[in-house]
Image: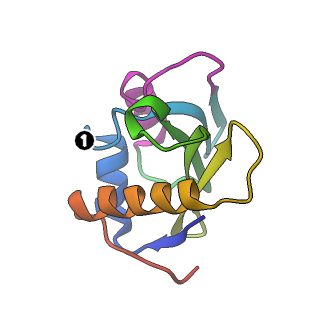
Amino acid sequence: MLALSISEIKAFMAKLLKDNCFDDFQLKSAVVDSFARFEVSADDVVLWAAVRNYVFDFIKGGVAPKLIRVILCADVEKAGIENAGALFINIQFEGGKINLTTGMSQKNFSLDKTGDHAWDDAVLRFLDDNNIKYSNEI
C-alpha cells in the first residue's frame, strides 16, 4: 500500500476533473462536501469518464469544497496482477491537501505481497507518466 501526498493540488485536480487522465478507471464512489453533499456510489461498472463532469459541475464556483473523496478501481484483467480481486486508488482532498492511497484486495487469501507491490509500482508509473507530483510524506 502506498500513502502519498500530492504536491501540486491545482494541477492534480485539473487532471482528475477536467482531463481524461483518470478516465479509464472505474468509479467505486465519490463524495463532495461543499454547500451541500454530492455522493455517487457505483455497484456496477461505471467509468470515471461518465461521472467526472457531474462532479466537476458540482464543485466549480468560488468556494473550495471541504472534502472530496474519490475511490477508483483499475480493470483487474488489464492490470494482469495475479490474485487481484480489486485494485484501488483512494483520493482525498481535505484541509487544503490531497492524499492518495492504494490498495489491493485478493481473490484468495495469501501472505504473498507480490501483487500489492506490482500495483503500487503501476500506480507510481501512472503518476510519473502523467506528470503528477507526489511525495511519500503524509
Report the predominant secondary structure element of the magenta stretch. Answer: helix
Q: Is residue 30 left or right of residue 50?
A: right
Compare residues 48 and 1 and report the one nearer the observer.
1
Image height check: is 118 above or below 9? above
The span shown in magenta is 41-60
Taking the spot 29% from the left edge, 50% from the top edge, the residue there is 15
Compare residues 117 and 9 and report the one nearer the observer.
117
Image height check: is 83 above or below 110? above
Taking the spot 50% from the left edge, 80% from the top edge, the residue there is 136
Residue 111: x, y in percent?
74, 59
Question: Most extreme residue toward the bottom, as rendered?
Answer: 137
Residue type for callout 1: Asp
Residue 47: x, y in percent?
43, 25
Compare residues 124 and 31 and report the one nearer the observer.
124
Image height check: is 4 above or below 60? below
Q: Is residue 122 left or right of residue 29?
A: left
Which quadrant is home to the N terminus? bottom right
Badge 1 is on which residue?
Answer: 19
Mark yes or no: residue 91 visible.
no
Q: Is residue 35 left or right of residue 127?
A: right
Residue 61: x, y in percent?
41, 45
Q: Say how many tags the image has.
A: 1
Which quadrant is home to the C terminus? bottom right
Taking the spot 38% from the left edge, 66% from the top edge, the residue there is 9
Is residue 34 rendered magenta in the image?
Answer: no
Residue 93 occupies quadrant: bottom right
